[in-house]
Amino acid sequence: MEKVIIQDATLYHGDCMTVELPQSQCVVTSPPYNLNKRASGGGSSKMSYDGWYPDDLPEREYQGWQRAILSRLMESCAGSVFYNHRIRYAWHSRNKFRVPTSIYHPMQWLQDFPIWCEIIWHRGGTTGHANGRYRLADERIYQLGKPSVFHDKGYTTVWKIAPEKGSAHVCPFPLEIPTRCIDTCTNPGDVVLDPFMGSGTTAIAALDLGRRFIGYEIVKGSFDIAVERVSNHQRQLCA
């Protein structure tokens, strides 16, 4: 497994499920959503998804994978695991498996975990096509486990934060989300973990707040972006 250390950030290129996870005070992550994008027929988004990771597991296998990862994160984290996901409607012809409710909800695999808080991320716009349904404008952030510390910043359970734009990563994570999670539930010097690091946004938030960071990313292209991004950001912090 490739390892890059950039001062207080340790970045790994590899699968977080193949190693023993380090101890942390907080986890902030957004996993692949299993959206079946490669089977969507292309269209205007086709170029954006070329070279992206496969995101089309059988749904039962996907949910089992997420349960396994969350179980390991809960064991290694001393505080809260912040887990970003979304409601997915299972009505499209590209969906390989159907459920009676025509919906895949994160609670289907989170119901056995200790949910401390559910946060609605209001994206400030709409995603997807209505097709007879109200347009999606939100995602969810589940806080699993009681935080070891809590600094009350006055946030409610609805966070109106615009999606990130102009990123080299296909699903950019707004910096404000990990910043809020880390700022309220850790202290300076604490370790923050992201097992689905992507382009390194959680790392940037952690470093900005004086925390240490450990991240894993299985896609080489995203890992390289994260290394470059964290390196450049660290130089700015030290300038």
Image (spheres, rainbow, N blue to C red):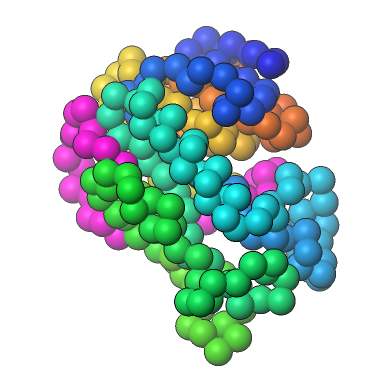
Is residue 157 at least partly visible in the picture? yes
In the picture shown, does residue 102 fall above or below 221?
Answer: below
The percent position of residue 133, horizontal first and vertical second, equals: 51, 85
Q: Would you say the magenta stretch is mainly helix, strand or loop?
A: loop
| Magenta stretch holds residue 130 | no
The percent position of residue 145, horizontal first and vertical second, equals: 27, 38
Question: Start and end of the magenta stretch?
Answer: 143-171
Image quadrant holding the N terminus, namely top right
Left/right placement of residue 237 relative to residue 210 reads: right
- What residue appears at the point 57 percent right and 55 percent down from the top-left corner? 60
- What residue appears at the point 36 percent right and 32 percent down from the top-left corner? 74
Q: Residue furthest bottom?
A: 132
In the picture shown, does residue 155 fall above or below 150?
Answer: below
In the picture shown, does residue 16 fall above or below 23?
Answer: below
The percent position of residue 199, horizontal first and vertical second, equals: 62, 36
- What residue appears at the point 45 percent right and 63 percent down from the top-left corner? 105
Left/right placement of residue 118 relative to residue 8 reads: left
| Magenta stretch holds residue 144 | yes
- What residue appears at the point 46 percent right and 70 percent down from the top-left corner? 137
